[in-house]
Image (cartoon, rainbow, N blue to C red):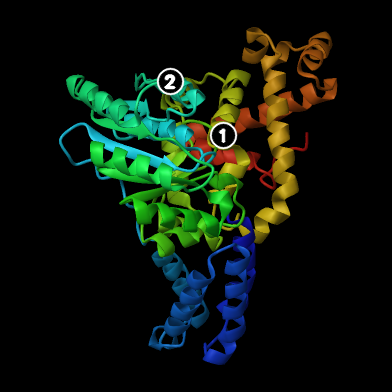
Amino acid sequence: MFENLTDRLSQTLRSVTGKAKLTEDNIKDTLREVRMALLEADVALPVVKDFVARVKDRAVGTEVSKSLTPGQAFVKIVRLELESLMGAANEDLDLSTTPPAVVLMAGLQGAGKTTTVGKLARLLKERKKKSVMVVSADVYRPAAIKQLETLAGDIGVTFFPSDITQKPVAIAEAAIREAKLKFIDVVLVDTAGRLAIDAEMMAEIQALHAAVKPVETLFVVDAMTGQDAANTAKAFNDALPLTGVVLTKVDGDARGGAALSVRAITGKPIKFIGMGEKSEALEPFHPERIASRILGMGDVLSLIEQAEQTLDRDKAEKLTKKLKKGKGFDLEDFRDQLVQMKSMGGLGGLMDKLPQMGGVNLAQMGGAQGAAEKQFKQMEAIINSMTPAERRDPDIISGSRKRRIAMGSGTQVQDIGRLIKQHKQMQKMMKKFSAKGGMAKMMRGMGSMMPGGGMPKF
């Protein structure tokens, strides 16, 4: 996400950071580069013009001239203007109404609307502790109804059945009546998508909106369509009173034009971003964190939140107690650590949020990152090919056992030896951390497994 923009802006802003004084002349080239970087990221032209003008007004004013470090002050201005462009702060769903709170989901076909309904249902259930019902009012695509039913079952929320013989308004009204009887907090209504905006579609969704009176009307749009995403959102907003936008497929959007254009063109906040296929891959949109990520400053707050949600606390506590009792860090524990890193998005997901890991540094480390991801998979396969006794006590692994494990994991015998050696190094490290105390130190120790962090070549 934003790789190209981060790369361009990092290089451009580096040239101005050390300047003792900023004038209209010496920031002219920098502003031209910023303008080009935004246009290449597919940000809408009117948005770019307005952004550059605001940065210029602030940069040549007293705000920078009084600063001891004008170059750094300029970078701060760019960051603040990026935040302002995207909405300044996260705007949460407003569910403060007599239950059930109805959320209407709209969008074009293929934007990931039904998947987003499932992701939002999971987020509301797990993070907001709400009871959720999902219902499909898409009577044109039977597969959409079945897909939503499957998602609801996987996530563990209530599914209200519907079929293609019914009218969308009747489906939604029946679902809301059922939700009231079951004391459901939130009803998410999925609607029909179209390949393009047309009068028939708008009339149908307007009638649905008027009937169910939703507290939130969210427009789901594919981030990879760039500034077209913002223009489509505006067309929907002209027909419907949208309360917010959900950007999907953000992980596949290296440019970021949609994220930077939607708020300015529609006047509506981006409330969530979809970062992958999994049901947990939906994040609240925090403009200040995204601006920091764009400028290569990382997004440590999101990383901490992600760790709190994905790390298995029970396993972490068990491991801490086990080490304190003097019991060794065995290969089962080693595998758990690898799986936990993978659940946080692997090295790519971690690096994207770490300061100084974005832009040019990430590009330079691309090869190492890919190699490390491959290496982690290989290590997991080797451990999975061992017996429970071998995982608990690797010292019993003889030459014949190594050959069996290598065949089972599709690796070489020498790979098994290297893994056992690596495990012994991890054992020593874990002993030190457990002596000093704290799971946080253990997790920091996992950083040494990253490329450049002391991981032996496999």
Q: Is residue 333 left or right of residue 206?
A: right
Q: x, y percentage for residue 216?
A: 29, 44
Q: Residue at x 47, y 73 (%)?
A: 51
Residue 349 visible to an observer of this rendering: yes
- Few, some or many C-alpha atoms within 10 Å of disc 1 (few <14, some 14-19, many ≥20)? some
The residue wearing badge 1 is 341
> Does residue 140 lie above or below 252 as drawn?
above
The residue wearing badge 2 is 149
Residue type of the residue flagged with mark 2: Glu
> Does residue 30 lie above or below 165 as drawn?
below
Between 440 and 232, the one nearer to me in the picture: 232
Q: Residue at x 38, y 39 (%)?
A: 105
For the C terminus, the image quarter is: top right
Q: Which structural element holds mark 1?
A: helix
Residue type of the residue flagged with mark 1: Met
Q: x, y percentage for residue 180?
A: 18, 24
Between 204 and 260, the one nearer to me in the picture: 204
Q: Is residue 332 left or right of residue 176?
A: right
Q: x, y percentage for residue 424?
A: 67, 27
